[in-house]
Amino acid sequence: MGKLVILKLGEGNFEQGFPVTLQIGDENVRPSVEITGALPPNPEILRDYYRWQSIYRNLRLSSRPIGLPKEFNQAPSLEDCQQVTEELKVRFNSWLAADSFRTIREKWLEKLMLTDNIRVLLQTKDLQLQKLPWHLWDLLERYPQAEIALSAPAYEQVNLNRIATTYDKVKILAILGNSQGIDTKADQALLNSLPNADITFLVEPQCQDLTDQLWEQHWQILFFAGHSSTEETNEIGKIYINQTESLTISQLKYALKKAVERGLQLAIFNSCDGLGLAREFACLHIPQMIVMREPVPDRVAQQFLKYFLSAFVRVNSLYLAVREARERLQGLENQFPCATWLPIICQNPAEMPLNWGELCRNIGNVHTSLPKTTPVKRITNRLGFSLLLLISMAITGILTGVRYSGVLQPLELSAFDQLLRLRPPEKADSRLLIVTVTEEDVQAQKQEKPQGSLSDKSLAKLLEKLEAYQPEVIGLDIYRDYPVGKDYPALAERMRKSDRFVAVCQLSDSQAGKLGVKPPPELSPHNLGFSDIAIDSDNVVRRHLLALTPSPSSPCTATYALSVQLALRYLYTKGIQLRFTPDGAWQLGKQGFKPIEAHTGGYQGVDAFGHQILLNYRSSGSSEAIAPHITLQQVLTGKLNANAVKGKIVIIGTTAETFGDYWLTPYTTPKGKLQAIPGVFLQAQMVSQLLGAALDGQPLLWTWPFWDEVIWVWGWSFLGGLLTAYLRRFTYLSLAGGIAIISLYASCFIFLIVYSCWVPLIPAMLALVGHSLIATTYLNIKFKN
């Protein structure tokens, strides 16, 4: 595999220097090495170059320029040219040996072998840098299979619009322009000697004839021989197509653009001073060009074409063919100084270099003496869309069936938890106040001998203090299946008559062997809420049980959860009441509460008893950050602020570990284990979700319909097949696959945080990777056989 070296020279000048970036890597893959350096200021190089250029252009040579001014009354000699040539070469290499450029040089020597086939792209927009004789760099001359090309900093790959017809011969449009004082017939003869080529010659054409040919035909190579020049003032190249007409590239813009879109691969301007032409051609993004840096003597132009065509059809590599032809011109330098300086390749970095065999459909017919080589394949779909569709649909069907059976549920729930944990933190819900009965509070009540975590005495004092500050509703998340003691008749009376006090009981479940817990005898049924919670097979709470119908034998007859009772009482004061849609779904304000079903999102075959929704936890740094909270003893000792209670929902519950009222959540501890939170904080999460949905417009967690999820999974499966079909190299496929997986993960996360939608992640990822692996295996077997 060949090596690609990109030398990027940034903004600068010869008075201040240039920043340099070197990239080295294999062909057609991302660079494996990148390093920076700098070329120091050196105005003398520019002065030496212009001195050389002035002497070279005033030599009495039979060239292909028109109208170049002569600065000397007496033409300089060949010895004068050779002397300034050597001085420029020495100064140029001294500049490239500077300390600030040493890191570039050392990295080159470290990463590149002398036997490597190397393409070097000099990427700069500075015309003065482009004119320098980079091929004389001693480092480049050391590598026999390396050649340098010029490249523009801005480039792009052309969207090809080619006809389906392929040609057995290379299609060449050869323009023989103004031949005044030169022999373009020699160029014509050399082109005619090309094997397997279909050449159309335009001899001193009119502009209309030229543009018609570019518009109406499909060309692979464009050739020009004749006079050309570059205007120094605006760096615009010009070709002389006949005795009276000259054209710039911009005047042929639309015709040339169409030719490039239809497959024009190479333009050869075997004419003078072609860097201006190359700079104008850059905006058309042609893959490759060959031009002459300076005025080229007629004989040098003919010999270069002869050597290049011979090498191109023989060695197939454009770069090595140009180097061979350029170096063979050294035999003419006794008569034509600096002939080897003139030819230069201009490359579009977005395109791979072509070879002669690639231009032909039947390479074996190019020449009987040529070695048979395999053409470089273009990026094409090697599977076919029908097969891609078939495989993607099969994978989607299999995954849908496996998913429906519940096999993927643990993975999907785990992925869902991970996405939840990545959500940005939210502020605490200031509409709530949590009163916690801690382990210290329980110990402080030992003399009162409470039957649970809260004695009658402490409860009486607590309710008295709370109600004095006018809360909207008080919820007791502590079981009291026993009557108030005779010593506290005021407490019993308060519990019987209060319209803002709600307590809990537990429903019986014969299947789970739960007998249930009776409610406090003093409370009326409409002041009760059940404490039952829907938990998943891994004991994590991800669902919010809103209501259900209790068993006739249940000691608890509450139909609504404690969280619902508290939220409804609070919302009633805000003018919002529970309503039901025609299909039986709940509605609070503008928010509908569609219950989950047995097959909802990642849940497959879950027990969707009662009326359940997904629990949208308020994301916070810790379990206690859901709402403001205060301990029992702090309340009883007068540390409670009235503003923290007035108009709020107060939830009372225990955090003492001895009572075991802890529940696993999707969130994790710093050690990576699932976080367990006290039941009172879980109730606060549920109440906060209902309030946020009804008052704040906060969306509930929801999932797509079944067929939408199937289409989503199929789309990612099809993408996996496409990547494998089009990307031949394992490196590219791995990189694209990684980007696709990251994109899938990011998409699911965005859907969750922006739209509160739980989108299938695991099935889509399995479809993407699965199709890619199947397609890779199929291709390996196919091409191996």
Image (spheres, rainbow, N blue to C red):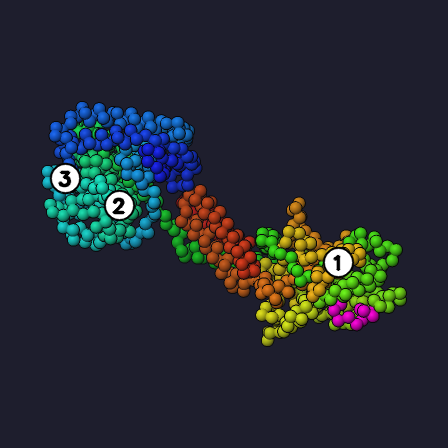
Q: Which residues are magenta?
A: 492-501
* Quadrant location of the C terminus in the rendered image: top left
Location of residue 447 (image quadrant): bottom right
Is residue 422 placed above or below 489 in the rendered structure? above
Is residue 383 placed above or below 457 in the rendered structure? above
Neighbourhood count class around disc 3 (C-alpha, 10 Å): few under 14, some 14–19, many 20 upward: few
Question: Where residue 117 appears, x then y in whole percent?
Answer: 34, 33
Q: Amino acid at mark 1?
A: Leu
686 sits to left or right of 415: right
* Between discs 2 and 3, the one toward the N terminus: 3
Is residue 340 placed above or below 151 in the rendered structure? above
Majority secondary structure in the magenta region? helix
* Between discs 1 and 3, the one toward the N terminus: 3
Question: Where residue 294 appears, x then y in whole percent?
Answer: 21, 35
Residue at the spot 16% in from the left edge and 37% down from the top edge: 68
Question: Where residue 31 appears, x then y in whole percent?
Answer: 41, 39
* Between discs 1 and 2, the one toward the N terminus: 2
Residue 67: image tag = 3
Could you tell me if residue 756 is visible in this image?
Answer: yes
189 sits to left or right of 6: left
Query: Which residue ends up furthest to the bottom in the rendered image?
Result: 582
Name the residue carrying label 1: 640
Q: Nearer the viewer, residue 591 or 437?
A: 437
Dot 3 falls on a residue whose secondary structure is loop
Residue 281: image tag = 2
Q: Are marks 1 and 2 in contact (CB under 8 Å)?
A: no
Is residue 63 found inside the magenta-colored segment of the image? no
